[in-house]
Amino acid sequence: MDTIDAFLRAEMEPLQYGVFFGALVVLAILELFAYRSSKAPQRYRRWPTNVGLTILNIIVTGAIPVSGVFISDYARENSIGILNILEVAPVIALAIGFWFRSFVSWATHLAMHRIPLLWRVHRVHHTDPYLDVSTTVRFHPIECLINTPILLASLLMMGISPITLMLYELLDTAMAVFTHANIRFPRRLERVMRFVLVTPDMHRVHHSSWQPETDSNYGATLSVWDHVFRTYRDKSPEALPSMQLGLAECQDDRSTSFWWLMTLPFRSRYLSENTFLTPQGFGLSENKANRR
Ligand SMILES: [Zn+2]
């Protein structure tokens, strides 16, 4: 365990970038052949915005002065957190820490949908009217700044070990790209996978423009918490390709405007369906419900 810990500490940054960009390239190629939706992905309009937000988030994340590993080390050295106080065996601590970390991710995502102020920020991610690998890091940078203290507090509370945290972050990075990819699997394989992991079909339901579906499937890596807390929602594979994605009230060019998205958290909770750019391409929504 110590050898893995030392290796991860030394190589974490290149590993994380390698996993992210490796998954991005492999899954983007897969999207060309095994796609779930055959709708035109409008890459020339969506990708510049999504790539711009990705770069911005990489910069913001890099500028945060405190790392999770630093806090985990601090908690261990000072016997802070449940697992450190109880001196749980490393393997058991890894299993519990992994589950707890995925629970924190699930709970934070739930809060992003349920608390109106947080939804204003998180809805930037949900405005993408299409879903593919480029949607992965389409977040407002404020969301990153909100998530970080929650993560650090949870590390201190549970005493999650640095190795658990680093392994989780690597899996989470790969899973984030995987769950947003526009890919399909054979039905039986997909059903087996979703017992443990969040699948692209599961997460596609979360990106539906219909609110009951948007407010479901909050998991990012493990599917267990959606099952436990009954936020799991299924949809037949036949219905998935034609499902409207994004926000019902924002099916126009605003969803691909970088500056509009940057100011979205400061706009009204109730977005009008008026377009300030041309609505060509994505079409206007038939669902007029402003949801929050
Ligand atoms: Zn969400």
Image: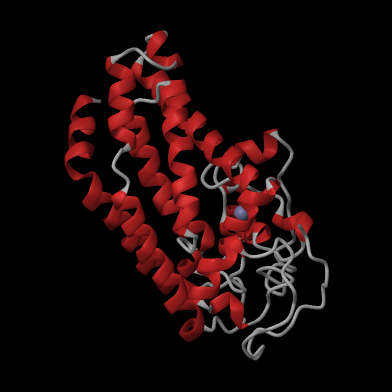
Q: Quadrant of residue 242?
A: bottom right
Residue located 53% across and 40% down the image? 105
Nearest to the observer: residue 198 or residue 256: 256
Above-or-below relation of 40 to 5: below
Above-or-below relation of 215 to 257: above
Q: Is residue 83 visible?
A: yes
User: Which colour style is shown?
Assistant: secondary structure
Where is residue 70 shown, x and y percent of the image? 28, 31
Q: Is residue 182 visible?
A: no
Along the horizontal axis of the image, is 254 left or right of 232? left
Quadrant in which the C terminus is drawn: bottom right
Residue located 76% across and 78% down the image? 285
Circle count: 0
Residue located 59% across and 46% down the image? 109
Residue located 32% across and 63% down the image? 21
Along the horizontal axis of the image, is 110 left or right of 42? right
Nearest to the observer: residue 10 or residue 56: 56
Along the horizontal axis of the image, is 232 left or right of 21? right
Where is residue 7 shown, x and y percent of the image? 18, 37
Quadrant in which the N terminus is drawn: top left
Nearest to the observer: residue 251 or residue 163: 251
Along the horizontal axis of the image, is 100 left or right of 272? left
